[in-house]
Image: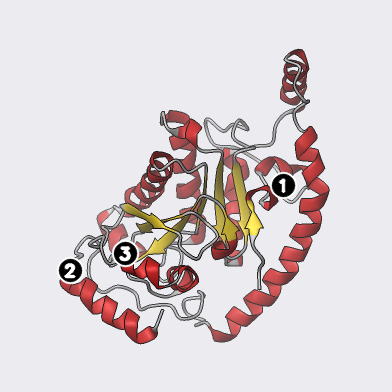
């Protein structure tokens, strides 16, 4: 079982490039920049074990718990999370709502409802709805004085969003928010937390396209500037963490391999997702209503989530 991870133990892109766990892309997107490499993180672990200000739950429209990441978060948080969620009157697809973290190591849980891929794609809304999930979650984190936020791989479970496409959409929207939103300075860390290997692979492919490694000339310029300001040379504190993170990543990889084997034994080959996943929704996203929420609550109680 994964142990609690503090923010300092979650590697930034800068660390991952130094460790050569992340390699530069052959080509980058327009506007790609290394400016946020000390702010963006990626890790494969159990999101319920992250000691950060806020984690983002891949919720359903009832907000009353379900399977996969949603169920894991509700179980780890305890019954008080369910009681608070019952007061929120559900959540529309593409929107997000925030609660306390209760028994979780995080302070807040941001619940966002991702799009069901095969339904929303028919109407050309899948991309904009997923983008909205990330934007609304970032807004809520900043508005609630959160300095760090960890995203699960939204909609890539039974909602069917292809991991590669979802990662590109998520990373692009996060970068756009950082570039354009006046609240962006309020966040010190934005973490992409994956449980499944397929999602981790997608993020490792797309992150270097948006956030390439710092060039030598740029690092030299920043070093001179830091010395002129009487500050510790940039990278020194980061370098102190690299050896520690390297060994932790190796241990984490071994633990993840064991966890994945356990999950593979109980998951469906068709979905390729975590155990105890709910059925794919049969109603159109956005058709949430209290009667359905009450029905889902009954299901939830039966499962004792």
Whether the residues at callouts 1 and 3 have beta carbons within 8 Å, the answer is no
Using the rendered view, name the quadrant where residue 138 is placed: top left
The one of 176 and 78 positioned closer to us in this rendering: 78
Instruction: Tell me which residue sits at (76%, 52%) in the image.
Output: 245
Q: Is residue 302 visible?
A: yes
Q: In this view, does 289 lie above or below 148?
A: below
Q: Nearer the viewer, mark 1 or mark 2?
A: 2
* Helix, strand or loop at mark 1: helix
Q: Which residue position is annotated with label 3? A: 85
In the foreground, 192 or 264 = 192
Q: Is disc 1 surrounded by few (<14), some (14 to 19) or many (20+) residues within 10 Å? A: many
Q: Are marks 1 and 2 in contact (CB under 8 Å)?
A: no
Residue at image coords 36%, 59%: 114
Q: Is residue 62 left or right of residue 178?
A: left
Of the two numbered discs 1 and 3 in the rendering, the one whose residue sits closer to the viewer = 3
How packed is label 2: few (under 14 Cα within 10 Å), some, or many (20 or more)?
few
Label disc, if present, on residue 290 of the rendered structure: 2
Q: What element carries label 2?
A: helix
Q: Quadrant of residue 284?
A: bottom left
Residue 58 appears left or right of 282: right
Whether 15 is drawn above or below 59: the answer is above
Asked if one can make out residue 204 in the rendered structure from this viewpoint, the answer is: no
The numbered disc on residue 16 is 1
The earlier-in-sequence mark between 1 and 2 is 1
Residue 111 % position (x, y): 38, 58
| Mark 3 or 2, nearer chain start | 3
- Contact between labelled residues 2 and 3, with CB atoms less than 8 Å apart: no
Nearer to us: label 3 or label 2 = 3
């Amino acid at each position: 079982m994964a142990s609690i991870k503090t923010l300092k133990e979650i590697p930034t892109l800068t660390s991952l490039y130094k460790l050569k766990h992340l390699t530069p892309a052959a080509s980058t997107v327009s506007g790609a920049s290394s400016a946020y490499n000390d702010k963006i993180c990626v890790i494969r672990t159990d999101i319920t074990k992250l000691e950060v200000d806020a984690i983002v739950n891949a919720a359903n429209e009832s907000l009353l718990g379900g399977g996969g990441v949603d169920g894991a978060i509700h179980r780890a948080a305890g019954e008080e999370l369910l009681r608070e969620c019952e007061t929120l009157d559900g959540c529309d697809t593409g929107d997000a709502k925030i609660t306390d973290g209760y028994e979780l190591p995080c302070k807040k849980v941001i619940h966002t409802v991702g799009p069901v891929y095969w339904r929303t794609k028919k109407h050309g809304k899948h991309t904009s709805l997923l983008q909205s999930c990330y934007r609304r979650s970032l807004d809520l984190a900043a508005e609630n004085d959160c300095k760090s936020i960890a995203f699960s791989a939204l909609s890539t479970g039974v909602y069917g969003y292809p991991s590669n496409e979802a990662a590109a959409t998520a990373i692009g929207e996060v970068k756009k928010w950082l570039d354009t939103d006046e609240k962006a300075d309020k966040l010190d860390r934005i973490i992409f937390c994956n449980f499944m290997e397929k999602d981790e692979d997608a993020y490792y492919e797309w992150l270097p396209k948006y956030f390439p490694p710092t060039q030598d000339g740029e690092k030299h310029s920043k070093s001179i500037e830091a010395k002129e300001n009487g500050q510790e040379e940039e990278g020194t504190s980061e370098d102190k963490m690299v050896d520690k993170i390297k060994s932790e990543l190796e241990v984490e990889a071994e633990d993840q391999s064991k966890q994945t084997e356990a999950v593979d034994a109980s998951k469906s080959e068709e979905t390729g997702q975590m155990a105890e996943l709910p059925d794919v929704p049969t109603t159109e996203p956005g058709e949430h209503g209290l009667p359905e929420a009450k029905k889902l609550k009954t299901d939830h109680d039966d499962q004792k989530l």
